[in-house]
Amino acid sequence: MDKIMSTISDLKSDNERLKQDNIDLKQQVTDMQQKLDITENQSRRNNLKIHGIPGTINEQWDTTEQKLREFMKNTLGL
């Protein structure tokens, strides 16, 4: 009976450790997804140039988006 109780205790301990590992891995995946999104956005920002919209290499994404919206509204009438 003591052996069974010991085995159960070990299994509970392993289960708790695995639960914590799972939580940690989920957080790592979330963090990596956010970093990937940021990297993809930065990559896309430098790939498209529209004549008539001035910009700089280190321009913030929000600034670029606002310039594009203004261009589309004022120049293209959209």
Image: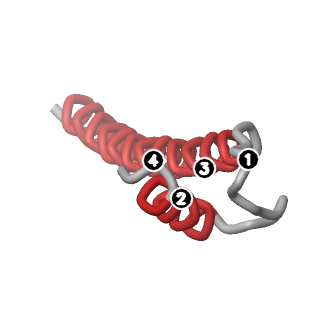
Which of the two labelled residues, at mark 4 and mark 2, occupies the earlier sequence position? 4
Q: Which residue is mark 3?
A: 35
Q: How many C-alpha atoms fall within 10 Å of the one at disc 2: few (<14), some, or many (≥20)?
A: some
Q: Could you tell me which secondary element the residue under label 3 belongs to?
A: helix
Whether residue 66 is situated above or below residue 6 in the rendered picture: below
- Which is closer to the viewer, label 2 or label 3? 2
Would you identify the image quadrant in which residue 44 lies?
top right
Would you identify the image quadrant in which residue 18 lies?
top left
Do the residues bearing badges 2 and 3 touch, measured as CB atoms within 8 Å?
Answer: no
| Residue occupying image coordinates x 68% and y 47% | 45
The residue under label 3 is which amino acid type? Lys
Q: What is the CA distance from the residue labelled 3 to the residue labelled 1?
A: 30 Å
| Residue occupying image coordinates x 57% and y 65% | 67
Q: Which residue is mark 4?
A: 30
Q: What is the CA distance from the residue labelled 2 to the residue labelled 3?
A: 29 Å
Which of the two labelled residues, at mark 1 and mark 4, occupies the earlier sequence position? 4
Q: x and y percent of residue 53 in the render? A: 69, 57
Which of the two labelled residues, at mark 1 and mark 2, occupies the earlier sequence position? 1
Do the residues bearing badges 4 and 3 touch, measured as CB atoms within 8 Å?
Answer: no
Q: Is residue 69 left or right of residue 47?
A: left
The residue under label 1 is which amino acid type? His
Do the residues bearing badges 1 and 2 touch, measured as CB atoms within 8 Å?
Answer: no
Q: Which residue is mark 2?
A: 71
